[in-house]
């Protein structure tokens, strides 16, 4: 065998070896690709589940998003300290697991509060929005005067009625009593031109509301029915000085 032939055969053998190794590599790469293609959806799903689990733990159990602060909004009579004490059982609990209904019930039990909203403010604040009851009259009470709102609900007990707030008195009037509610309804219906003159109100029954005016005159109002019409008639009658203005029947008013 000549040297040229030997070199030729060696080159052929080297070429065949390289071709063989390249084919094996390509087959192996293709096999790996097929395996990854098969397992990739499962890997993606497992990754997403792990991520959701982590997020769920952070939101539902981690102290990172727990209730740590209470913000009171809309309060005048209700104090921050009162609300802090009522929200205290929820402090430290993850905000997502806050028992908003329980907080709402506790805050609504305060006599000054008419309605409550409890909001989660991420990452760690419990916001308590209150709408307070607005006193419209003062009712004599053994301990002083009970301020009541338009629904006749007691708001606050004070020694003396605030200036400008009418005093409602009657033999049987108590908070929530029908006579009291009737008197409050009348006071709520009065235009400013009249309410500014009212210094007191009596109501023995729901149909016997009377007003005391700053002039010393007395107004027989009757029931809260037709209060707008009665107010309009009274404004006309006040042009004539009298001790008593009876508008209980606004179609046939009487002065004396």
Image (cartoon, grey):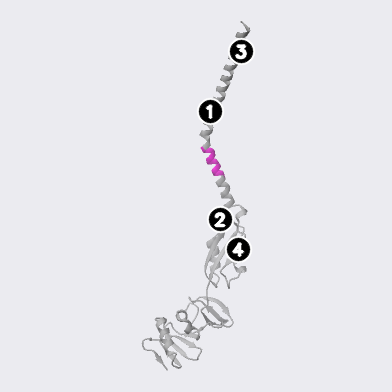
Residue occupying image coordinates x 54% and y 63%: 118
Q: Residue furthest front?
A: 4
CA–CA distance between discs 1 and 3? 30 Å
Indicate the position of residue 125 as horizontal and vertical percent values: 59, 60
| Residue picked out by circle 2 | 96
The part of the chain drawn in magenta is 41-50
- On whether residue 153 falls in the magenta region, the answer is no
Residue nearer the viewer, 92 or 7? 7
CA–CA distance between discs 3 and 2? 76 Å
| Residue picked out by circle 4 | 70
Q: Is residue 127 above or below residue 247?
A: above
Residue 172 seen by the camera: no
Q: Earlier in the sequence, mark 1 or mark 3?
A: 3
SS at mark 2 in the image: helix
CA–CA distance between discs 1 and 4? 61 Å
CA neighbours of label 4 inside 10 A, class few (<14), some (14 to 19), many (20+): many
| Residue picked out by circle 1 | 30
Indicate the position of residue 53 as horizontal and vertical percent values: 56, 46
Tell me whether the residue at label 3 lies in contact with that at label 2, contact meaning CB atoms closer than 8 angstroms: no
Q: Earlier in the sequence, mark 4 or mark 3?
A: 3
The N terminus: image quadrant:
top right
CA–CA distance between discs 2 and 1? 48 Å
Residue occupying image coordinates x 61% and y 65%: 84
Residue nearer the viewer, 79 or 86? 79
Indicate the position of residue 238 as horizontal and vertical percent values: 44, 90
Instruction: Please name which of the two marks, 1 or 4, marks the residue nearer to the observer.
Output: 1
| Residue picked out by circle 3 | 10
Q: Earlier in the sequence, mark 3 or mark 2?
A: 3
Indicate the position of residue 216 as horizontal and vertical percent values: 50, 91
């Amino acid at each position: 065998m000549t040297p040229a032939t030997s070199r030729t055969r060696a080159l052929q053998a080297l070429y065949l070896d390289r071709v063989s190794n390249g084919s094996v590599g390509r087959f192996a790469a293709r096999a790996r690709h097929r395996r990854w293609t098969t397992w990739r959806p499962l890997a993606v799903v497992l990754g997403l589940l792990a991520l959701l689990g982590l997020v769920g733990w952070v939101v539902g159990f981690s102290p990172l998003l727990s209730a740590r602060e209470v913000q009171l909004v809309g309060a005048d009579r209700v104090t921050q300290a009162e609300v802090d004490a009522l929200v205290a059982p929820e402090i430290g609990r993850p905000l997502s697991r806050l028992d908003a209904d329980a907080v709402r019930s506790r805050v609504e039990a305060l006599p000054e509060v008419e309605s409550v909203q409890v909001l989660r403010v991420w990452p760690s604040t419990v916001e308590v929005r209150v709408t307070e009851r607005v006193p419209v009259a003062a009712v004599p009470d053994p301990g002083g005067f009970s301020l009541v709102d338009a629904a006749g609900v007691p708001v606050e007990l004070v020694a003396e009625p605030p200036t400008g707030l009418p005093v409602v008195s009657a033999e049987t009037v108590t908070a929530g009593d029908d006579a009291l509610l009737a008197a409050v309804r009348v006071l709520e219906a009065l235009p400013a031109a009249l309410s500014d003159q009212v210094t007191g109100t009596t109501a023995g029954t729901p149909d016997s509301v009377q007003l005391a005016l700053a002039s010393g005159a007395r107004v027989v109002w009757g029931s809260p029915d037709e209060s707008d019409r009665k107010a309009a008639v009274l404004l006309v009658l006040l042009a004539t000085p009298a001790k008593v203005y009876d508008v209980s029947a606004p179609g046939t008013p009487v002065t004396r």
